[in-house]
Every structure is written in structure tokens, then in C-alpha cells.
Amino acid sequence: MFKLKKWALIAPLGLLASGVVTAAPPTVNVTAHFSDQVNAVRNDPKWLTGELVIGQSFIPDGDTVSFLSANIFPAEKRQERIVKTGEKGKNLQIALKELQDGNPGNTIAARSDREAGVKVGALNLYRIDAPVTPGKSYLLEFRLDVPGAGDYYFWYQYGGNHYPKGDFYMNGQRRGGCDLDFAVYRPVEITPNAAIAAPRPPEILEIRFQEKPDRTRTTIFLSGPDGIARYVPVWSDDRTVLLGPLKLPVRPGQTREYRVHINTDGGQSPSVVIPFTLHEKN
């Protein structure tokens, strides 16, 4: 955790001279979440019923899966990747497993969409926070906890090998030539003046406050070579906010400078400003 003071940049000199006391900047952790493995191609929707277990195998590049996203949603939403609290469904069970000789193996992490699901923009995200070994095969599995229920739809790609490092699974059996519409993310902590190398820009920013902030007076934005990008904050709990999808321009081979700006009292006190650089590997 860290706290940066930018008095000279933000506080008017008149306020300082008059002795007006403002609140200290917040103490925060900032994490960027990068897509590690992804298949965004789809052409076939199916019902997810209580008798069906679907899955997708993948091989991570990073050593942690922080979040995963999947194009699975309550049936009345049809083709939207959107889930809101209180809507039909909320009984989706998610598991991250080792893949052993092409078959589902030990379970590393298990969550439900009720406890782990959060909507960020058009993404259905599920927090996993599980260690993985780069280059090893893993399996994401999705099922319903109510036999016979058919509250969910899912999209996958039938035919074509759009994600060559894995396959779609149905009831534990590999369905070669098919892939789920999915993504897994890896976390990278953003510290002041951090230099980060990655194949593409991050998709999500996560800010964790040491103390519960006033949501109505908290502002967070990202500045960079393309200007200021503002996002609707999504609070996953009283001290954690997610921003995204960031949709930053992809520029392979370039190094760019960014700043995360955070203020928790409506701009009345100094902000936390975290500069970092991102080098996109070719």
C-alpha cells in the first residue's frame, strides 16, 4: 500500500497560506488485470441445464488467475453478457481444475456467481484468485447447482480452432474444434513508476482502499498518451472498486506513460497519482 501527496499540483496556494487543513490522500493498492488467454469468437448459443457441465481448457502464461469472464448469462438476457444482482439465475457454479491426460483433475478453486460474480461494463467477471503454473493445462468448468434448472444460456464457437491452446468440454469430454467464449486474467500490481511489459494493455483496473471511502465523493480516472479516460466505477465491496473494460489502444513495440488519479473527497484534498509505463511486447 502507498500514499502519494501532490500538494503543489493540486492544492491552491491560497488555501495553504490561509492554514486550511484538508484530508490526507487515501492509502491504496492498485492492480491491473491483463487478459492472459482469450477466445472472443462465438457462433452457437446453447442452454445450460442442471444435467450439463461445460468447460474450456487453456494454458496460462502467468502464474495467477485473478478473474475469468465467460459468455454465460441468465436466459432472459439472450445474447447479452450482463448479469445484475437479483435477476433470474445466480446459481452458476465455477471451478478451476488441473487437466490430467486430457481429463478433469484436481480442483484448484471453486466459486459461485453469487459470491464471485461482478459486472464490469459488458463483462461478466468471476473472481478466482488462484495460483497456476505457466505452460501447464487447466480446465474451467461451469454447472448449475439445481438439477433440471435451465436458467442460463451460453455461447461457444462450434467448428474452427480459434483458440489452439485448448478445447471446449462437455460433461468432462473434450469436444475438439470448439471453444467457449471466455477469457482468463492475470494480475500485475501498479506501484509508483512501475515499468510493465505485456503483449497488450490491461483490461481492468482494481483499486483497494485501506479505509472505506465515501463513494459519492470518490473519483478515479486514467490519463495517458490518448488523453483522459473516465469509467463508471463498479464497487465489488466497500473498499474495492473496478474500472473497465479499459479498451486502451494496442500499439505493439511501443512504450507509453500512464497515470492513475484517485481522490476521495470531491477534489478538496490532494489526490493519489500513480505514474507507470507500459511496454507492449511484439
Image (tube, grey):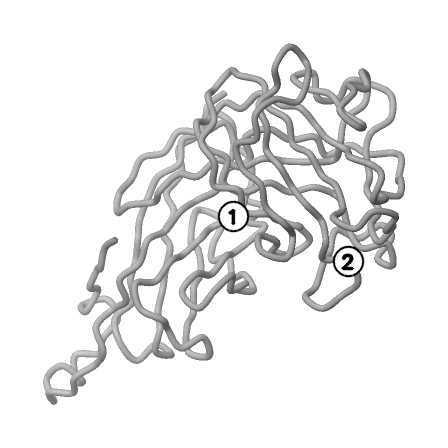
Residue 56 rendering spot, x and y as whole percentages? 70, 28
The residue mark sitting in front, 1 or 2, is 2
Q: Residue at x 72, y 54 (%)?
A: 91
**Nearest to the observer: residue 169 or residue 214:** 169
Taking the view exactly as shown, the residue that stands out farthest to the front is: 147
Which image quarter: residue 118? Answer: bottom right
Q: Which residue is drawn at 80% across and 55% down?
A: 74
SS under mark 2: loop
Residue 255 rendering spot, x and y as whole percentages? 40, 33
Crowding near pointer 2: few (<14 within 10 Å), some, many (20+)? Answer: many
* Amino acid under disc 2: Gly
Q: Which residue is drawn at 56% across and 64% down?
A: 232
Residue 145 rendering spot, x and y as whole percentages? 74, 48
Taking the view exactly as shown, the residue that stands out farthest to the top is: 101
Q: How far apart are marks 1 and 2 (CA)?
A: 25 Å
**In this view, 139 is above or below 209:** above
Which image quarter: residue 177? Answer: top right
Crowding near pointer 1: few (<14 within 10 Å), some, many (20+)? Answer: many
* Amino acid under disc 1: Ile
Residue under numbered circle 2: 89
Residue under numbered circle 1: 204
**Nearest to the observer: residue 204 or residue 267:** 204
**In this view, 164 is above or below 70:** above
